[in-house]
Amino acid sequence: MLFVEILIILLATKIAGEISIRLGQPAVLGKLIIGIIIGPAVFGWIQESEIIHQLSEIGVILLMFIAGLETDVKSLRQNRNSSIAVAVGGIIFPLLGGYLVGLVMGLSQSHALFLGLLLSATSVSISAQTLKELGHLKSRESATILGAAVLDDILVVVGLAVMMSLLTAEEVSLGAVLFKKLIFFVAIGLLGWKAVPWIMNKFSSWRVSESVVSTALVLCFFFAYLAESLGVAAIIGAFAAGVAISQTPYRRVVEQKIEPIAYAFFVPIFFVSIGLSVSFVGMGGQLWFIVGLTIVAVLTKLLGSGLGARLTGFHRRSALGIGAGMVSRGEVALIIAAIGLEAHLLKQEYFTAIITVVILTTLITPPLLKKLFSKLEANHETVT
């Protein structure tokens, strides 16, 4: 009954988003919580399925594509040193924190190290949406968060490749992993600089309906496919496509036409899909593990990434806001958890607890950003 499920998702997310706004929180928080309520954990109206998964993938790709369209490229370049510091701090602290928690829980060295690596992941799709709602997506802080997320993705994937090559029977060539990453960034650099403007100009003159928007979507999904094929998260490719198109005269028309498509249909499905992985069955015995690991997951990103921002010129509140923007582990950590389970780097009995922690970090991010950015005036509180 796909049509009924979509009806429930669209209606429920709009109602939940409105309630969240009336309670003084970003709409995205209500949409994330309603996914848990209508999912298997509570009412069971919506079940995980391949079609829901695929639609949610489109949703997160479009979400990051729009974030790319609205990104200030000049600010992104100016804050590259801050992005590097934020990414490095946001990996070292969670890696150590997760490793120590794993040892305390009695995990082996390899399993504890994998837990640390999993906590090092960052997915800023939820942060990007929250910052957009708060009117900070074009700020210096936002540019730093988005830049750090790209680097974080690279470093975590490389770390995963090293770990799997050393600790499992799988043959993973670190050189091949790095080479594929290099190909990706060289390719999107050249395509974004030369090919994207030419393609947008070429196809904009076609007389078929919505030629500009259709061309933009083709580029978005091509960049996402290219990223995933070369071992980089698809959302990074979509973000890169948005940044490239933002440098053309078609930025505004693409943004105006894509947003209704994304936010009316695909993005709500993505928000709900996050909650579908939640299950309260058998969680009682691991409650303290979940609570403790969630606290470590939040604090290590908040402090690690925040310290990186502080050391590169941001004031305290701005630095903490940047740290908060890196807290959500989202779909990136879910993918790493699935890989770890298959490679026997994550025990089956801890899998549900880890998924719960990942989702909790995602739920915590919107109100945390709201609190830290509510009094922040970026033009006054950051050192330019």
Image (cartoon, rainbow, N blue to C red):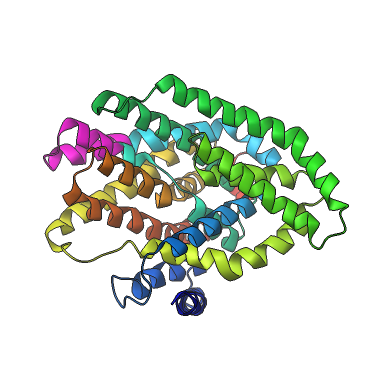
Task: Give the answer, above or below, for where 214 lies relative to 241.
Answer: below
For residue 8, side relative to residue 186 (left or right): left
Q: Position of residue 213 (x, y in %)?
A: 74, 57
Decide if residue 70 is in sight here: no
| Region rendered in magenta | 95-116
Give the farthest residue toward the top: 175
Quadrant in which the C terminus appears: top right
Q: Position of residue 292 (x, y in %)?
A: 21, 51
For residue 157, side relative to residue 149 (left or right): left
Most frequent secondary structure within the magenta stretch? helix
For residue 38, side relative to residue 130 (left or right): left
Q: Position of residue 103 (x, y in %)?
A: 15, 37
Q: Residue at x 22, y 38 (%)?
A: 344
Q: Quadrant of residue 291?
A: bottom left
Decide if residue 103 is in sight here: yes
297 part of magenta stretch: no
Q: Position of residue 211 (x, y in %)?
A: 79, 56
Task: Give the answer, above or below, for where 265 lies relative to 366.
Answer: below
114 part of magenta stretch: yes
Q: Residue at x 41, y 38 (%)?
A: 90
Nearest the eye: 345 or 354: 345
Q: Residue at x 30, y 28 (%)?
A: 170
Q: Quadrant of residue 29?
A: bottom left
For residue 17, side relative to residue 79 (left or right): left
